[in-house]
Image (cartoon, rainbow, N blue to C red):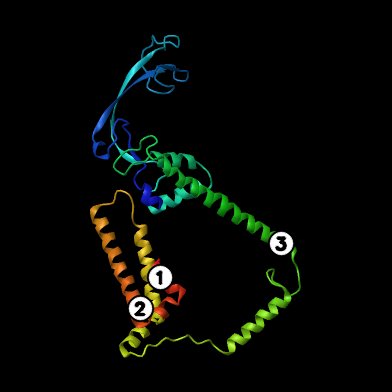
């Protein structure tokens, strides 16, 4: 979600007068007034201690006063801040740093100022987006991180205080014996998988294919490949890379559609949706 909202939106031109990415080209002349300073080590006068000096023996510390004009030609560059959502790795790094409450307000202010990948941020452009960062801090930091650590420490202290012969820290001796008995009983008779073979021969053949373990492993591999493809999306992608990811996404969508259609054809809708995994696979 962070990548969809802010990918490339934290970028700006180092020339503050430029707002659009298309205009951030060539270079600009940076003119500033620099104060003179006396370098006590080199005994010279320059813009900063140890900086550019002037080989004039008449210069003394008392004479090293005033300012001079500095003119520097600077190449314009368009780049993002250190904490951004330009790709999956930088987004995870940014959210991890935010979960520690270290500098999360700076990221929130960047999000509020962000406009689009083609425009530099503008002060308070989208204030309601701050709720995204506040909600993440509440969920990731206060609820999940602190509560998770608190529960671990509490359970560790409770289990450390428990002791009983034959127990393993989580179960008493009687519970351990009951579990061992249940395992022996289950090993005697291996449970059989429920079959929903349709009467039609064609549907029965399709059912045998979709229920094979190899088919499940194939779909799992496609899911992993699809997740990896989604992770490859990043800011400032080339047209060829964008077209490649789009083609792969369509290819994976066709496979998932084929999987659902094959299972619905082989089973009745009642048998298909009776499985919670199939419901999750179909709707999510």
Residue at the far front in the pictured view: 270
Is 202 situated left or right of 284 in this image? left
The residue tagged with tag 2: helix, strand or loop? helix
Mark 1 or 3: in front is 1
Residue at 41% x, 42% y is 111
Measured in 3D between alpha carbons, the distance from the residue under mark 2 to the one under mark 3, in whole angstroms, is: 49 Å
What residue is drawn where x is 49% and y is 43%? 104
Instruction: Write down the residue under mark 2.
Output: 264
- Mark 1 touching mark 3, by CB under 8 A? no
Report which residue position mark 3 lands on. Answer: 158
Q: x%, y% of residue 9?
A: 35, 43
Q: CA distance from mark 1 to mark 3?
A: 39 Å
Which label sits in the foreground, 1 or 2? 2
Which of the pair 115/184 is nearer the observer? 115
- Horizontal side of 31 relative to 168 (left or right) equals left
* Numbered circles on residues, count: 3
Mark 1 — residue?
281
In percent of the image, x 37 and y 38: which residue is there?
125
Residue 180: name its quadrant.
bottom right
């Amino acid at each position: 979600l962070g990548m969809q909202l802010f990918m490339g939106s934290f970028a700006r031109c180092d020339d503050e007068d430029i707002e659009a990415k298309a205009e951030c080209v060539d270079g600009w002349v940076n003119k500033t007034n620099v104060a003179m300073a006396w370098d006590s080590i080199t005994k010279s006068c320059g813009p900063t201690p140890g900086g550019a000096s002037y080989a004039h023996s008449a210069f003394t510390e008392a004479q090293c006063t005033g300012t001079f004009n500095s003119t520097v030609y600077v190449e314009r560059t368009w780049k993002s801040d250190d904490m951004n959502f330009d790709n999956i790795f930088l987004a995870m790094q940014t959210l991890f740093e935010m979960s520690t409450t270290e500098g999360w307000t700076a990221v929130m202010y960047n999000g509020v100022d962000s406009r689009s990948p083609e425009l530099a941020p503008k002060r308070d452009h989208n204030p309601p987006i701050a709720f995204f960062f506040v909600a993440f801090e509440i969920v990731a930091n206060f609820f999940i991180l602190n509560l998770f650590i608190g529960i671990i420490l509490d359970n560790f202290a409770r289990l450390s205080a428990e002791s009983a012969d034959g127990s393993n820290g989580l179960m008493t001796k009687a519970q351990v014996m009951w579990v061992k008995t249940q395992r022996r009983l289950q090993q005697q008779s291996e449970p059989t998988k429920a079959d929903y073979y349709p009467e039609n021969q064609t549907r029965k053949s399709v059912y045998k294919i979709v229920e094979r373990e190899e088919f499940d492993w194939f779909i799992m591999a496609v899911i992993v490949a699809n997740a990896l493809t989604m992770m490859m999306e990043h800011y400032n992608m080339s047209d060829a890379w964008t077209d490649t990811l789009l083609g792969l996404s369509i290819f994976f969508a066709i496979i998932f559609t084929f999987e659902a259609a094959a299972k619905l054809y082989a089973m009745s809708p009642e048998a298909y949706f009776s499985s919670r995994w199939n419901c999750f696979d179909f709707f999510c």
